[in-house]
Amino acid sequence: MFKNNSFFWGIKAIISKEIIHILNDRLTLSLALLIPAIQLIIYGFAIDMDVKHIKTAVLDFDKTNYSRVIVEKLRNSQYFNIKYFSESEEELSSNIVDGKVKVGFIIPKNFQSDVLLTNPTQIQILVDGSDSSIAQQASNTGSLIIQNFSLMTLEKKIGISTNFIEPRTRVLFNPDLKSANFMIPGLLGVIMQIITTFLTALAIVREKEKGTLEQLMVTPVGHGALLIGKLIPYAVIGILQFTIVIVVMTLLFKVPIHGSFLLLCILSMLFLFTSLSIGLFISTHAENFSQTQQLLQLIIIPSILLSGFIFPRENMPFIMYIIGYFIPLTYFLEILRGIILRGAGFMSLLHNIIPLTLYGVLVLAYAVRRFKKQIA
């Protein structure tokens, strides 16, 4: 009887100890309770397989009632978000290369007169093939809208049901619509962020757990030297990681790099700098390995789902779309796919380079300031 009482008293004592430990570690408790709800909200809103609101440009050489009807049908379908009316084919192609639009429609001159005379005519659809899912949706839906216009609208107006308006699709950058050409460059960015951020955060948190961070403070090494010394080895790992992934991408998956390899390397180092900054930021808030893992989940999962890595950002609710602008991977994915798949140059990517640079500088400045306060 005495032994049984000791057994249950022992369980009660351990339970009480763990409850006190959990309540004292408020950050871990808060993250454990909040992260599942945050993940569910992100997954629920971000995962939408129906591609809509595709960024679109129109080049209307005809500028007649019939051409305007085509444009309105594209807009009213909710599948095409017409953002630009181009003045030339060069401008339209430039918008696609820059990533400003995913599809362009070219309505030929004399379109209305050819329709009224029942002469065969074409509407060209230029599709950015770097994203195979969007390309297929844009091509299929655009062709269907044009064919319906030919069959239904013209039959109502002139009593002819012959489909003589031909949608002519031209796929740019990835004519075979290989999904690997879209996913592999994105995976390069995701892998770089996950590994570099995790290793950097864990390295400093491990020093905190072992109590060796305080010991380093009594050495002649200054705070700045300590920080740089901790970050440089993981920067080197990130560079090696980038090199390995590029080799595997080009040799194993046969994904060619259409743009400047030098520009790709320079901008990848910029993203590496940002990932190191995020890792340092996490380490200044986490006190142990468990908190590090939870904070990483809070950053990595939204980065994967809301950056456009898998699902088009245009399909997401407005608030999720806006959150994507605060995720550095959003800009790096545009840079990777722009250089590797579309052959985009520096000026075409400048609208992604500037916010990525600002993000890295601001996060690093905050993390360094907080780190110095902690070790002081």
Image (tube, rainbow, N blue to C red):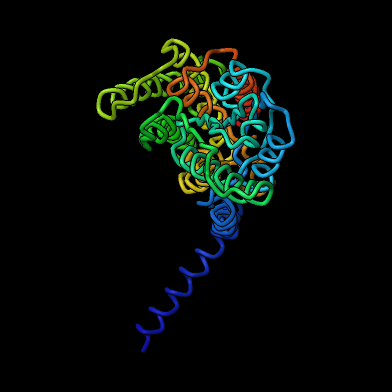
In the drawing, does residue 320 fall left or right of residue 343? right
In the drawing, does residue 35 fall left or right of residue 190? right
In the drawing, does residue 199 fall left or right of residue 114? left
Residue farthest to the left, as pictured: 252
Q: Position of residue 135 (x, y in %)?
A: 48, 37
Q: Nearer the viewer, residue 266 or 57?
A: 57
Q: Residue at x 38, y 32 (%)?
A: 184
Q: Residue at x 67, y 27 (%)?
A: 60
Q: Is residue 205 above or below residue 46?
A: above
Q: How many marks can you see?
A: 0
Residue 238's quadrant in the figure? top left
- The answer, for residue 180, to whether it is visible in the render is yes
Q: Position of residue 53 (x, y in %)?
A: 62, 43
Residue 147's quadrant in the figure? top right
Q: Position of residue 309 (x, y in %)?
A: 49, 38
Residue 119's quadrant in the figure? top right
Q: Nearer the viewer, residue 312 or 37?
A: 312
- Image quadrant containing the N terminus: bottom left
Q: Nearer the viewer, residue 230 or 100?
A: 100
- Image quadrant containing the C terminus: top right
- The answer, for residue 212, to whether it is visible in the render is no
Q: Nearer the viewer, residue 109 or 100?
A: 109
Q: Position of residue 125 (x, y in %)?
A: 53, 32
Q: Residue at x 59, y 15 (%)?
A: 90
